[in-house]
Amino acid sequence: MTASSPLGINLSFCVKRWVTPQLWAPVVRDRLGLDLVQFSFDLVDPMWPAAILSRHAKDVRQAADDHGIAIHSAFIGLAHYTFNQLLHPDPDVRSYAEHWLERAYGFAAEAGIPGVGGPLGAIASRTDGTEADTLDDRDYADLIERMLRLGEKARAAGLDALYVEPTPMRREWPWTIGQARRMMQDVSGSATRWQLCVDWGHGTILPLYGPAADTMEPWFSSLSDVIGAIHIQQTDFQFDRHWDFTEPGRVDPAEAKAQLARTGLAQSPVFLEVFYPFERDSASILDALTASALSLRQAFA
């Protein structure tokens, strides 16, 4: 019998709510019945003073140990994602984003988190609104150079893995299966291994990819050897919704598990990644998360 994918949750749902490990750890373990998380840097800013970062890293490590929670990785979060990061038009801003990640690596290592990842950046829009299908060769070469340098920095920090998350936008990289494969080949010599974290709502954007993109199976089957983690969400295949599973949508948890089994990813960790309006009350969010976690646990059992 094939083992089921480890099921966890990205702490994106905690933003501006359960912001310390003393708050999110019991929610994850006792309310949702999960023991695997992906930390979010929406909860900790790597640019905080070193003493504050160190104290929070120790708190994260202790709370995870106390509640029997494993932290698979730490992702950049929504706040940092809004910046253009490693693809900003200004090279000095790119270098600052690289430094931001180096600081994130240090925090993760101290907190006992073995990997860090997320989307890498976005080029600026053109004044006429047109979007190219690929990055400029110079931008791409600069990005690969920075990824290799980050691999060295991650190794120095003591990390085991780095992740890049493909996004469904022409201004980011990679956004196609072919681009993802090329990137993984181009960083294959990294001092710290780069892998992909693919999202169920990213490879299924029909307005971008066309009617054949109503399944993640092509992404999974084509890239299974370089996929290290998976995000699952409920969505309508029109936009990147990040709904929970109390909402109607196109993602069926049982079929999701079957797709992973068919494509050799049955043992890859899967993280529910959901976002909520800041105005929504916390009690209703807990109820929705509890129902969603139950639905996924039953499907992936």
Image (spheres, rainbow, N blue to C red):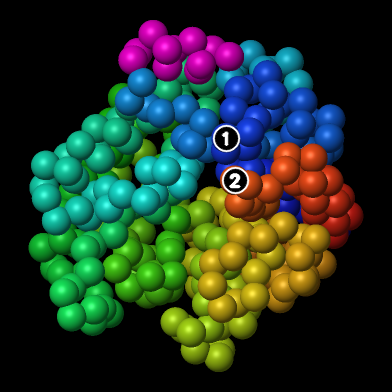
Residue 297 visible in rendering? no
With respect to residue 49, does 33 lie above or below? below
Which residues lie in the magenta part? Answer: 49-59
User: Which of the 4 quarters of the picture holds residue 61?
Assistant: top right
Tell me the amino acid under the disc marked 1: Lys
Nearer to us in this view, 39 or 161? 39
Q: Is residue 116 magenta?
A: no
Q: Residues within 10 Å of mark 1 (few under 14, many from 20)?
A: few
Which corner quadrant of the image does residue 136 belong to? bottom left
143 in relation to 211, above or below: above
136 or 239, which is in the foreground? 239
Q: Residue at x 61, y 82 (%)?
A: 214
Judging by the rendered image, the residue that carries numbered circle 2 is 278
The rendered magenta stretch, by its main secondary structure, is classed as: helix
Q: Which residue is mark 1?
A: 16
At numbered mark 1, what does the secondary structure look like: helix, strand or loop? loop
Q: Position of residue 244 (x, y in %)?
A: 72, 57
State which quadrant residue 286 falls in.
top right
Q: Is residue 140 rendered to the left or right of residue 223? A: left
Whether the residues at callouts 2 and 1 have beta carbons within 8 Å, the answer is yes
